[in-house]
Image (cartoon, rainbow, N blue to C red):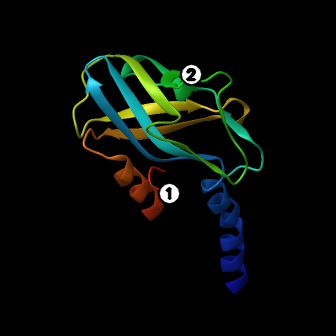
Amino acid sequence: MKTLTLAAIAALLPVAALAHDGMHINDAYVRSTNPQVGAVFLQLENHRQVPCTLQSVTTEAAERAELHTHLEEDGVMKMGPIDGGIPVEPGQTHDLARGGDHIMLLGLTDPLTDGDSLTLTFDFGDCGTEEAEAVVDNQRSPEDAAAASEADPHAGH
């Protein structure tokens, strides 16, 4: 009986390991101060053994979602699309945060209200796709986001 129990536990170990493998989307939230656009912030975490690049994001909540960043041009900060996606090395994280890389939601199908939740699909190319829920939180400050990510880096999966 002891051998059977150990064999059953050993058989389940690869399944437990797979549950933590892949790309993780942590602490996703949305801000929307305009009925037509919103911005998504989160943390990408790569648990794979290879680099993964976020190539695109889709959601039914908007006509399109674009990967954006802030760039300084002639002393002026400007927002623009990211060419080539957002790479995340194995064992590393990448924050999509206010004032930096983020996801723009353009052409919202409905205005977003605090507490609403929307589903996002993340395309990581050869690393596959992942889905995550993002909650609308227009009151959240950048400090709140950083504290939430540090308190529970695995929130959202």
Residue 59 visible in the displayed image: no
Where residue 4 sits: x, y (%)? 69, 77
Where does label 2 land, which residue?
Answer: 73
Where residue 19 sits: x, y (%)? 60, 55
User: In this rendering, which labeled residue sits more in front, label 1 or label 2?
Assistant: 2
Residue type at mark 1: give it: His
Residue type at mark 2: give it: Glu
Q: Nearer the viewer, residue 29 or 73?
A: 73
SS type, badge 2: strand
Q: In the displayed image of the protein, which residue is found farthest to the front?
A: 75
Q: Nearer the viewer, residue 25 or 75?
A: 75
Residue 154 is labelled as 1
Q: Residue at x 43, y 54 (%)?
A: 146
Where residue 100 sits: x, y (%)? 51, 36
Q: In the displayed image of the protein, which residue is found farthest to the right?
A: 50
Where residue 68 sits: x, y (%)? 52, 26
Q: In the drawing, does residue 137 fall left or right of residue 124?
A: left
Q: Residue at x 44, y 25 (%)?
A: 104
